[in-house]
Image (tube, rainbow, N blue to C red):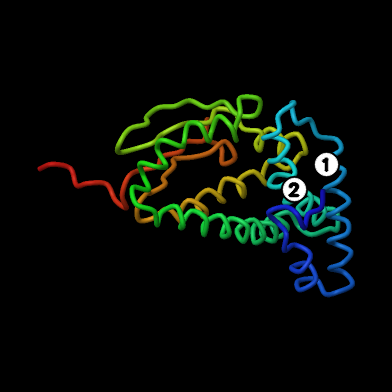
């Protein structure tokens, strides 16, 4: 698997532009090596969905971040640089969400597909999902366990997890104005759970007087 085939398909180009051709090529080459090492040492828990998360979404930013740290870049700066890449990837997802939001009855379609999507793509081998609400006004579920949080801690970079969490805010903004995404906190930002709220419409109705 190559980083070019992941959500960070543009990383090599960005490295060359940011660090210059010689150093950028070295940064990207080392990132690619570290990415392969992470994959070789990973346990996908027998789940094709988890394997896809590791290959395409989780390990590419982690490999880049750890490479930047290895090269002596301060942790906050390395986090900022990695965040630029993950936000760019989330922007691609946002455009996909916009296409969904453009469909008639977008909230209804999202509501009826959401549970099966979560079962398939966020299986219990990597996530603990608690459904709180799924009706005509709001979808609300909590994640009490998350493989992104597990693996960033395992690889001694728990601060990286908040970038993956922030991606949700970018990606799901594409659902506006049909669906509004809200959350109170995430495991990666110190909350006891990751909460996901998808509300029908762009704003809550005013309370009755």
Above or below 29: residue 19: below
Tell which circle, 2 or 1, labels the residue nearer the N-terminal end.
Answer: 1
Residue 23 placement, left or right of 201:
right
Q: Which residue is mark 2?
A: 62
At 85% across and 74% down in the image, what residue appears?
21
Residue 2 placement (x, y as % from top left): 81, 52
Above or below 105: residue 10: below
At 60% across and 35% down in the image, what residue appears?
121
**In the depicted view, which residue is nearer to us: 36 or 189?**
36
Disc 2: CA contacts within 10 A as few (<14), some (14-19) or many (>=20): many
- Identify the image quadrant of the C terminus: top left
Residue 183 placement (x, y as % from top left): 44, 42
Point out the residue furthest to the left here: 209
Tag 2 secondary structure: helix
Above or below 92: residue 48: above
Residue 48 placement (x, y as % from top left): 71, 33
Question: Which numbered circle lies on residue 38?
Answer: 1
């Amino acid at each position: 698997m190559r980083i070019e085939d992941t959500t960070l398909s543009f990383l090599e180009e960005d490295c060359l532009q940011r660090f210059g051709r010689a150093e950028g090529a070295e940064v990207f080459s080392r990132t690619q090596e570290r990415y392969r090492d992470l994959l070789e040492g990973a346990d996908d828990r027998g789940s094709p969905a988890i394997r896809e998360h590791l290959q395409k979404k989780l390990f590419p930013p982690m490999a880049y971040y750890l490479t930047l740290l290895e090269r002596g870049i301060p942790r906050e700066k390395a986090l900022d640089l990695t965040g630029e890449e993950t936000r760019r990837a989330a922007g691609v997802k946002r455009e996909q969400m916009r296409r969904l939001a453009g469909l008639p009855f977008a909230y209804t379609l999202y509501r009826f597909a959401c549970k099966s999507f979560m079962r398939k793509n966020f299986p219990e081998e990597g996530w603990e999902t608690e459904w709180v609400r799924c009706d005509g006004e709001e979808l609300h579920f909590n994640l009490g366990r998350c493989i992104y949080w597990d693996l960033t801690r395992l690889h001694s970079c728990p601060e990286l997890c908040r970038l993956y969490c922030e991606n949700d805010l970018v990606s799901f903004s594409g659902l506006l104005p049909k669906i509004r995404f809200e959350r109170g906190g995430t495991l990666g930002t110190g909350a006891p759970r990751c909460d996901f709220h998808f509300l029908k419409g762009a704003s809550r109705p005013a309370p009755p007087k």
